[in-house]
Image: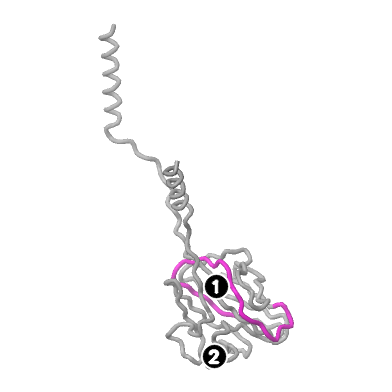
Amino acid sequence: MRKVLLAAASAVALTSGGASALTLDFTDGVFGTSNPAAFGVAGFQTISETAGGVTFSLTATNNLVGTTRWLNSAGSLSNGLQLGGGGGSVVAFDLVVDTDVTLDSYALTDVFGFLGTPDFDILDGATLLSEDNALSPRGASGLSFDNGPIALTAGTTYSFDINNTGSAVQTFLASIDFSLTEPPRPTPGAVPLPAGLPLLLAGLGAFAWMRRRQAG
């Protein structure tokens, strides 16, 4: 009985194993070793971060001061990725990954100057993939993406648009949990019959006929 239970448990483990969860951490104060230490310097537009063997490239396309650069994370990179803006402004960045991944959830570290309800959308070109993802309250984790999980294809540019409906809203993205997108499994086709099977069946039939004839 014990052997049967162990075999069943092994079968479940083999069939239920999925992609392991990975984390893109924005509180490590690094944002990729190739980036300058002075985060927020004019002209500093792209952040590259590698997690789980996947490289994420984030390029600022708009922010509070109207230029394509990132805001300084309140003097400390450990606060996370700062997403700020004045009332009604839209802060945006583009995201490109070098491997197919699925975005599962995200976490926030802090928010200040909070007078509204900041949120963000994810778009693939003009196609809205995920809408009104909350950027508050502070310290929230395990937040699900609207219409998520969100599958991203390697080499495709996705836009993250942060909508600030309050005044001087500043919020910090702590991390994104993701998993590697598993390739589709091939559909099993029909198993071909061995080439000699018809001959074998014919031989068995002839043998059975001879037995009946001898018995008669």
At 71% from the left edge and 77% from the top edge, which residue is drawn?
117
Chief secondary structure of the magenta span? strand
Which quadrant of the figure contains the N terminus?
A: top left
Q: Which amino acid does label 2 sit on?
A: Gly
Q: Is residue 32 magenta?
A: no
Question: Mark 2 or 1 closer to N-term?
Answer: 2
Give the SS element for disc 2.
Answer: loop
Q: Which amino acid does label 1 sit on?
A: Ile
Q: Position of residue 74 (x, y in %)?
A: 60, 90
At 57% from the left edge and 82% from the top edge, which residue is drawn?
80
Q: Which mark is residue 40?
A: 2
Segment tinted magenta in the rendering: 92-117
Q: Which mark is residue 111?
A: none
Which quadrant of the figure contains the C terminus?
A: top left
- The vertical placement of 143 against 210, above or below, is below
- Left or right of 99 on screen, residue 134: right
Q: Where is residue 195 in the image (x, y as percent from the top left)?
A: 28, 35
Q: Does the magenta stretch include residue 113?
A: yes
- Left or right of 10 on screen, residue 150: right
At 59% from the left edge and 75% from the top edge, which residue is drawn?
160
**In this view, which residue lies farthest toward the front?**
2
Q: Position of residue 175 (x, y in %)?
A: 55, 75
Total marks in image: 2
Q: Mark 1 packing: few (<14 Cα in 10 Å), some, or many (20+)?
A: some
At 48% from the left edge and 53% from the top edge, which residue is drawn?
16
- Left or right of 149 on screen, residue 210: left
**In this view, which residue lies farthest toward the top?**
216
Q: Position of residue 60 (x, y in %)?
A: 55, 83
Q: Mark 2 packing: few (<14 Cα in 10 Å), some, or many (20+)?
A: some
Q: Name the residue under label 1.
A: 176
Q: Nearer the viewer, mark 2 or mark 1?
A: 1
Q: In which quadrant of the rendered view does residue 67 lie?
A: bottom right
